[in-house]
Image (cartoon, rainbow, N blue to C red):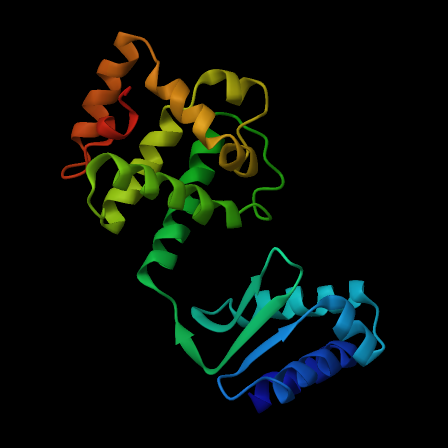
Amino acid sequence: MKELLRSIYLYNKTYYKVWVHIWVFSDSKNVFDFTYSELSSVLGIPETTIRRAIDKIFRAWNDDGRTLVEFEKSENGSNQIKLYPKGKPKSKFYEIHDEMFDWVKVWYKKNDYDYLEIGRHKKYIRLISDKIKKSMIERTNQEPNDEGVLNSFQLFFENIPDWWINQGQATLNKVNKNYDTILNQIKSKNGKKRDSYQKSSEQVGEVDFTKLTEND
């Protein structure tokens, strides 16, 4: 942790002040609960600067295959940072999210979709995949494996109706927001499209994605 804090000090002394405070006042489990307004008042640093300090360092510290910081924001405005001084190995499912992101970038390119903000919207990959996983569980009453969720994620995007793409409404944040609507539209596709969809789903193996999309 000393080396990490030292690197912040050399980079930006204001950011260093923020992170030293977080480290010193974290509890015995290295957890620090806060609101931006409280932290701003205690440190005498503008909230906007604190937000940049946390966001920039959070991304930098988690960029080499390890998780050094976890950040959670609650709906009531409070936030929580958990520090892992020795690093926490990233989960396999995190790697699956990376694979989804790499795949979907190719999908956008294939569909000639101009998407400058895709890097900032990467967080929606996890949200979309969680919704797909939930839909699969609701249909099968079984916990799907990572490969099944990945394949279903790909099939879902491959079957997004053209309207969303043509109208520029297929960005990750909008797909996440309109997930239920898009899924219902996939359900009601014509027979020819559903036949194609069936063939695709057979390639998934143990995950029958058509069960996810069939009408009630």
The residue lying at 34 percent from left, 35 percent from top is: 154
Query: In this figure, what is the number of numbered marks?
Result: 0
The residue lying at 70 percent from left, 68 percent from top is: 35
Residue 81 in which image quadrant: bottom right
Q: Is residue 150 above or below residue 65?
A: above
The residue lying at 52 percent from left, 21 percent from top is: 164
Q: Is residue 65 left or right of residue 24?
A: left
Q: Nearer the viewer, residue 44 or 105?
A: 44
Residue found farthest to the front = 76
Q: Is residue 164 above or below residue 14?
A: above
Residue 115 appears anywhere in the view:
yes
The residue lying at 72 percent from left, 64 percent from top is: 51
Residue 19 in which image quadrant: bottom right
Quadrant in which the N terminus is drawn: bottom right
Percent coordinates x, y for residue 58 in the rendering: 59, 68
Residue found farthest to the left = 206
Q: Is residue 96 above or below residue 196?
A: below
Residue 11 in which image quadrant: bottom right
Percent coordinates x, y for residue 24 in the rendering: 64, 89
Percent coordinates x, y for residue 93 in the rendering: 34, 57
Quadrant in which the C terminus is drawn: top left
Residue found farthest to the top = 191
Residue 10 appears anywhere in the view:
no
Q: Is residue 151 left or right of residue 55?
A: left
Q: Is residue 40 left or right of residue 104?
A: right
Q: Nearer the viewer, residue 12 or 124?
A: 124
Percent coordinates x, y for residue 74 in the rendering: 59, 59
